[in-house]
Image: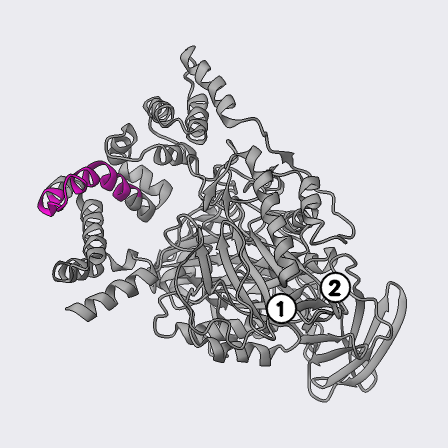
Amino acid sequence: MFKHTKKCLFLATALLNFLSIDGQAQDYKMQNVSIQTRWAKEVSPTNALKEYPRPQMVRPNWTNLNGLWDYAITPKNLDTKVLSEGKILVPYPVESALSGVKKALLPDQQLFYKKTFVKPVLKTGERLLLHFGAVDWQVTVYVNSKEVGSHTGGYSSFSIDVSDALISGDNLLMVKVWDPTDQGIGPHGKQVLNPANIYYTPTSGIWQTVWMEVVPTAHIEGLVMTPDIDKGVLNLKVNGAAGYSVEATAFDGKTKVNAVFGAADSDLELAVKNPKLWSPEAPFLYDLSIKLLKDGKVVDEVKSYFGMRKISIAKDAAGVDRIFLNNKPYYNLGTLDQGFWPDGLYTAPTDEALAFDIKAIKAMGFNTIRKHIKVEPARWYYHADKLGMLVWQDFVNPNQGLPEGSKEEFERESAAEMAQLHNYPSIVCWVLFNEKWGQYDQQRLSEWVKKTDPSRILNGHSGELLYVNEVLRSPSPNAYVSADMTDVHAYPDPMMPIRMDGKVQVCGEFGGIGVFIPEHQWLTGSAWGYIQEKPAGLMAKYKIMNQHLQLFEKQGLSGSIYTQPFDVEGEQNGLMTYDREVVKIPFAELRKIHSALNPVMGTIPVVTAKDADLTEPGLLYSAILGQYIAGKRDTTFLKKMAMMATQAGDKTGSELAGSAYISGLKMPLSDEEMASVVSFTKSTKDPGFALMNTNAAAFKKSMGDRKYTVAMMNMILKGEMEPLMNAGDQVDWAAVETAVKPYGAPGEEILLRAKTIGFYNKQDWKNYVPAASAYLEKFGVNVPETERAMFQTAIDQHK
């Protein structure tokens, strides 16, 4: 929700300083990134996501404000020295390459945006609304130095009536953002300040379209549409001005289906006899025209659409609880979609790219996407509606440490999420929690979600039972209370969840098979996955997994979610690479594998990608090693050799090529070269460590202070600490401390962390308490939320 105020808070100093060096701002240039998608080259300041951003409520009189804005990053709460640092391309997040900035926003900083716009012509009685698709996380908006509104929540859209702050001609729009990412109380999903493994680069600031719209004073503010195929009606509520009436007319193409008249803000029923039902194989959508009237005169009008479909839990002919779509059993064959991009992070480069992901997943033969702890722009759901894709929509998890205020914020933002996404027929299931990330009050919240939206089914806790290599991570005595399904996560191989009467059984995540494709990696030398597989072996492994799903389906399994369709940063366990260029199993083969569980796929979208090279990696690497022996030494070759040696399992060759690659580099290095140095440097004994240590400022600027420090800590651990820690039954911590002392703060932090974990695991509470207390006091801000809580609990229990 936004807060509107008529009080004029004048920030003269801040705004004047911000304006003072506007002319010095540089032109736009996409920043370097290790890999990028095919759509990145199409992005420019003149065409940044120009499509109408709200397809379910369309008006013709609108202005897109995407493009180049001025920006500045300043210390938090220091409004007196806001100087323009340059240009940023909105709506790409400040950390992304496509923004033209690619800088981290830290919790003790704030981000300012500034843009001028021309006041549109407003007729008598018209107002100007300023719309934001999403801004992460806390935002205050100023027009001509007057605060016009504020909003908290990184995933929900908001609108502000700015009419009273306008002046003739040019108007100054300024946006102030604070985003603590995973250090705050707000839901943040997979984006964290210290990305690694299954956590990714943060997204801060404006990351969805900003636009203006001219509306009458009394206008349609929103729609609530809920189909009922059993009654043959669309339940409709038009939020608008009291005392006005509405007329809603449904169309099948150009053919009028029916109309309904009634009062604004009242519950209406639009009859749709013998409806054409929406499904993934036949995603039929009705067009909808809605008019707001006063004394018979049309005051406002919007265009929309809806789909007639029903999702439910029912027993099949054998008495087994199943997911039903349109009153028939329907296996939800899905995949876990994170919605990240190498060039835009949370923001797809173009609308075509946004739609491509859904098209590619459909071309793989899936009928379901689990949208994983992220809310997409409205156009993503529009494409899912149009293309035909069931969506399990995750809520964005709260701060996992549940600091004071985080529960209330999670519930507030989750309520906004449900309201914002209610009208999309593609969304059939809400997912409340994921793997105990910030879990609390599960029964109360499950019942709240079901009461708020009884038109959809609820996965109350996906992966509350989590198995890795058939080992249960943690018990759950009251799993799946008040939910519509039982759900198990099993890595890598799928499992049957527990059976409970009245609930369907689903495997909410499985897979996670790491297959890296050389020259298509975000992080070179990394291929994170629960298990590793070579490209040629993936197809057989995947086929066997799906055959087990077929056996489970006969036992009652109603759905499954494979992890995942695309690689994401350090995770290289996708069916396609992160840049969307290589598919690891051909599309036709994937459809063939999936056809047993999803036999009727409808129209398959045309998508293009290269098939992975299935040649045995060892043979490819052997040829490269031969070139090395013959004297080939250029840096591009050495980098590729090091990566392929890792895949082929030649540790000696990897170290040889990596060291030779680093030795051939000369400062200054590009961001990509520095990333390669980091990936090929494992220890203080490697040549890359000296390069990073000597050129700390340059590496910190490229990587960010924290990522640099973590990398150095890991190298100190490997090179200095582990040999001493593994030298005998008892660790000589004094000797370890002497070894790490020359390395300053990184050495001290990794020493305290090692001592804390070591004493914790041995339950040596006498030594644990002082070590852990010192660790949390000095470096607690860097400790993951769940770990921090665990360490503190142990301190409290044993001090």
* Whether residue 684 can be seen here: yes
Q: Position of residue 452 (x, y in %)?
A: 59, 79
Q: Position of residue 764 (x, y in %)?
A: 15, 59
Callout 1 crowding tier (Cα within 10 Å): few <14, some 14–19, many ≥20: some
| Residue 494 vertical position relative to residue 636 in the rendered view, above or below | below
Q: Secondary structure at mark 1?
A: helix
Residue at the far top: name it.
Answer: 630
For the residues labelled 1 and 2, say whether their Cβ atoms are less than 8 Å apart. Answer: no
> Is residue 223 shown in magenta?
no
Q: Earlier in the sequence, mark 1 or mark 2?
A: 2
Nearer-the-camera pick, 68 or 614: 614
Q: Position of residue 164 (x, y in %)?
A: 57, 75
Q: Residue at x 61, y 70 (%)?
A: 420
Snapshot colouring? one colour
Nearer-the-camera pick, 238 or 83: 238
Q: Residue at x 35, y 36 (%)?
A: 678
> Is residue 717 shown in magenta?
yes
What range is drawn magenta here?
711-737
Q: Amino acid at mark 1?
A: Leu
| Residue 492 vertical position relative to residue 648 in the rendered view, above or below | below
Main SS, magenta residues: helix
Q: Is residue 278 left or right of residue 454?
A: right
Q: Is residue 117 left or right of residue 238?
A: left
Callout 2 crowding tier (Cα within 10 Å): few <14, some 14–19, many ≥20: few
Residue at the far left: name it.
Answer: 734
**Location of the C terminus (image quadrant):** bottom left
Q: Is residue 403 left or right of residue 144?
A: left
Residue denoted by label 2: 60
Nearer-the-camera pick, 638 or 726: 726
Residue denoted by label 1: 421
